Image (cartoon, rainbow, N blue to C red):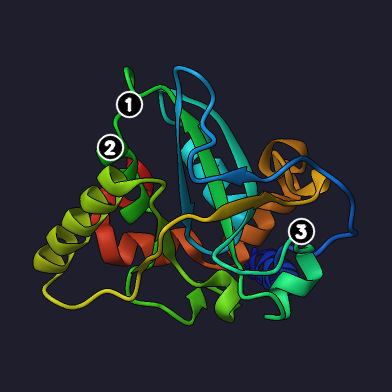
Amino acid sequence: MIRITALITALAAGLSTAACAQEAGDYAVPAGAADAPQGLAHAVFASGCFWCTEADFEKLDGVVEVVSGFAGGEEENPGYYEVVRGETGHAEAARIIYDPDVVSYEALLDHYWVNVDPFDGAGQFCDRGSSYAPFIFPADADQAEAARASLARVEAELGRAVAVEIEPLDTFWPAEAYHQDFADNNPIRYQRYRFGCRRDQRLREIWGERALGG
């Protein structure tokens, strides 16, 4: 039993070092700050590997769709490999399309916090570098105000400054098609990556029973 446990741990750790890497491909058109579908709203968050950010938000009632992509950089049409090498200034992020009559932006913020390590501005979990840094990207002034108030509440609760930055959303660039719905399409690889990255363990250390929105 000890040998089997050690083997599983070694395999998971090896996969974690590969993080989100795969081959390149095309996906969709970019979205600006005002580009929300009629009757719906959108929010953009970065909490490390976008596979996990996407999967974390898809479980919420009122969320219509979540898209993995990039935000915060200036270069147009960034590719995955350029982003993770730190060449474009973007962070891996997820765009949440949601029904504001079912779930509020404030509720999305609450869910974001318990799915991010707020103290790590140099990456998230096993993924290091600026492309994995945590951000909130407000799409308008109301979201920006709510985000700042939420950050202040979290700092007061935790008793220390957090490393999550708030940066106005300019353009969200969807990632390549193979990154979309990664957890659903590649469940074994996703779970091995997430376990090897010790993501959930770290979240529970910070947030206790509230970790992961549970």
Element carrying mark 2: helix
Name the residue rendered at 45%, 58% in the picture: 200
Please give the label number shown on residue 53.
Answer: none
Q: Percent position (x, y) of residue 60? A: 42, 30
Badge 1 is on which residue? 103
Q: In the rendered view, tell whether residue 200 sits above or below residue 163.
A: above
Badge 3 is on which residue? 77
The quarter of the picture where residue 14 lies is: bottom right
Q: Percent position (x, y) of residue 40? A: 45, 23
Name the mark nearer the viewer: 3 or 1. 3
Badge 2 is on which residue? 107
Q: Which is nearer the eye, 70 or 161?
A: 70
Name the residue rendered at 40%, 23% in the picture: 61
Spatial separation of the CA atoms under disc 2 and disc 3: 30 Å
Is tag 2's residue or tag 3's residue first in the polypeptide sequence?
A: 3
The quarter of the picture where residue 80 lies is: bottom right
- Camera sees residue 208: yes
Q: Which is nearer the eye, 77 or 62?
A: 77
Q: In the rendered view, tell whether residue 162 sits above or below residue 191.
A: below
Estimate how packed mark 2 is, as few (under 14), some (14 to 19) or many (20 or more) residues with alpha carbons within 10 Å: few
Q: Which is nearer the eye, 151 or 40?
A: 40
